[in-house]
């Protein structure tokens, strides 16, 4: 069985081709100042056209989202709720929903309509999910104050959990150590998490973001690297 895994981040696309659960190919495509405007769209076409797939798994880490309690059913309000966090383009974005039963929350998020249509037009089974839901489902939470940080290329997502309740989730660009530390410390002060009483857990591209990790370790006492993404093995948090 050939499965295509796709991860969309704020400035890139990562693809994995898996055959019988073994990764046979992994490619990363990131936008910089010199890449053409439709670079990611072109790369998506190349990936989708490589071979015939039996299934596609799509994860969006794009930061157009909102977090709501499980059971919220006013789906028509999804775009308006997301608009409080990020600009929304209803003509060019598809409204999506991911439910996390473990923590009893759900995510409304948008996904570029042109990417959505390219993938759906293949007429094979496709599963869409939001990175925050996938990340949250992998967290083994205890009962104290915890901060869980999942690092990507120039991006991170962040859960604050207290007594098995989600206090805060965010997904933001990270381009410097200063931005990263300011975000963490500002968040802690706003939600009343003391540095010494809070356990920190880091996941994802921890090697690529080694400087961020080392700077964070200067300020916090309890920091654990849960795992580092290994090429051709981990995809987000399997």
Image (spheres, rainbow, N blue to C red):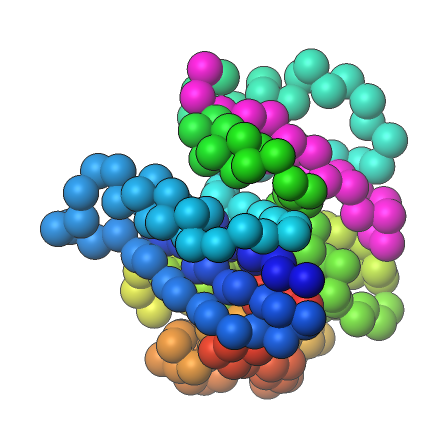
Q: Position of residue 84 (x, y in %)?
A: 53, 26
Placement of 119 over or under 22, stated as above or below: above
Please tell me in which quadrant of the rendered image residue 97 appears: top right
Q: Residue at x 30, y 43 (%)?
A: 42
**Frontmost residue, 235 versus 22:** 22
Is residue 194 in view from this perspective?
no
**Residue toward you, 35 or 77:** 35
Magenta-span inclusion, residue 18? no
Q: Is residue 66 above or below residue 133?
A: above
Q: Which residues are magenta?
A: 91-112
Please state if 27 lies on the left or on the right of 170 as rendered: left
Residue 43 visible in this rendered orientation of the protein? yes
- At x 43% / y 54%, what residue is drawn? 50
x and y percentages locating residue 184 in the rendered image = 50, 62
Q: Quadrant of the C terminus?
A: bottom right
* Residue furthest out toward the front: 52
């Amino acid at each position: 069985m050939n499965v295509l895994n796709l991860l969309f981040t704020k400035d890139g696309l990562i693809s994995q081709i898996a055959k019988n659960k073994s990764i046979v190919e992994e490619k990363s495509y990131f936008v910089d100042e010199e890449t053409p405007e439709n670079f990611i769209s072109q790369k998506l076409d190349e990936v989708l056209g490589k071979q015939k797939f039996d299934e596609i798994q799509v994860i969006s880490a794009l930061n157009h989202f909102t977090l709501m309690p499980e059971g919220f059913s006013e789906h028509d309000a999804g775009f308006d709720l997301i608009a409080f966090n990020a600009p929304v383009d209803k003509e060019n974005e598809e409204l999506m929903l991911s439910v996390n039963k473990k923590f009893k929350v759900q995510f409304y998020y948008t996904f570029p309509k042109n990417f959505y249509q390219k993938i759906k037009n293949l007429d094979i089974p496709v599963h869409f999910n939001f990175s925050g839901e996938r990340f949250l489902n992998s967290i083994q939470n205890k009962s104290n104050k915890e901060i869980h940080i999942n690092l990507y290329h120039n991006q991170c997502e962040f859960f604050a959990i207290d007594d098995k309740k989600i206090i805060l989730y965010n997904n933001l660009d990270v381009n410097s150590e200063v931005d990263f530390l300011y975000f963490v410390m500002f968040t802690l002060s706003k939600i009343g998490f003391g540095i010494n009483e809070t356990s920190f857990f880091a996941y994802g591209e921890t090697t690529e973001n080694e400087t961020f990790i080392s700077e964070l370790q200067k300020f916090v006492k309890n920091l654990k690297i849960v795992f580092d993404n290994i090429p051709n093995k981990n995809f987000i948090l399997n």
